[in-house]
Amino acid sequence: MTTMKDKTFILECMEGYTPEIGRLLAMMEYARETTFEATQYLSAEELDYRING
């Protein structure tokens, strides 16, 4: 599986969509992938932690 660390981030439009929607979808996909990579090894307790109780 290729991770975000293995590739340079270049925002490209996704095929089949208008340029604006294609860029938005590419940004959303990037945000999803980086969030997943940052949290994939956290436990449920760490994910559910609340700073102010």
Image: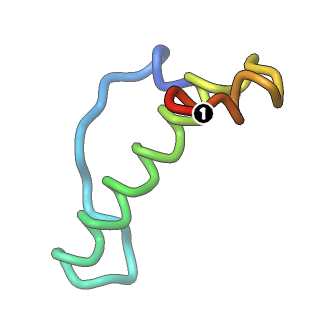
Question: In this image, 5 relative to 49: left or right?
Answer: left
Residue at the spot 75% in from the left edge and 17% down from the top edge: 41
Q: Residue furthest right?
A: 44
Residue at the spot 41% in from the left edge and 22% down from the top edge: 7
| Nearer-the-camera pick, 51 or 22 | 51
Question: In this image, 4 relative to 12: left or right?
Answer: right
Above or below, 16 against 43 in this view is below
Three-letter amino acid code at the position of disc 1? Gly
x, y percent for residue 40 = 71, 25
x, y percent for residue 13 = 26, 63
The colour scheme of the drawn protein is rainbow
Q: Residue furthest left?
A: 20
x, y percent for residue 18 = 23, 84
Residue at the spot 46% in from the left edge and 53% down from the top edge: 29
Residue at the spot of label 1 = 53
| Nearer-the-camera pick, 26 or 38 | 38
Picture mark count: 1
Would you call the spot at circle 1 few (<14 residues within 10 Å), some (14-19), or many (20 or more)? few
Residue at the spot 82% in from the left edge and 30% down from the top edge: 44
Above or below, 1 against 15 in this view is above
Disc 1 is placed on an element classified as: loop
Above or below, 1 against 17 in this view is above
Question: In this image, 2 relative to 34: left or right?
Answer: right
Tell me which corner region of the image, top left, top right, bottom left or bottom right, holds residue 38: top right
x, y percent for residue 1 = 71, 27
Quadrant showing the C terminus: top right
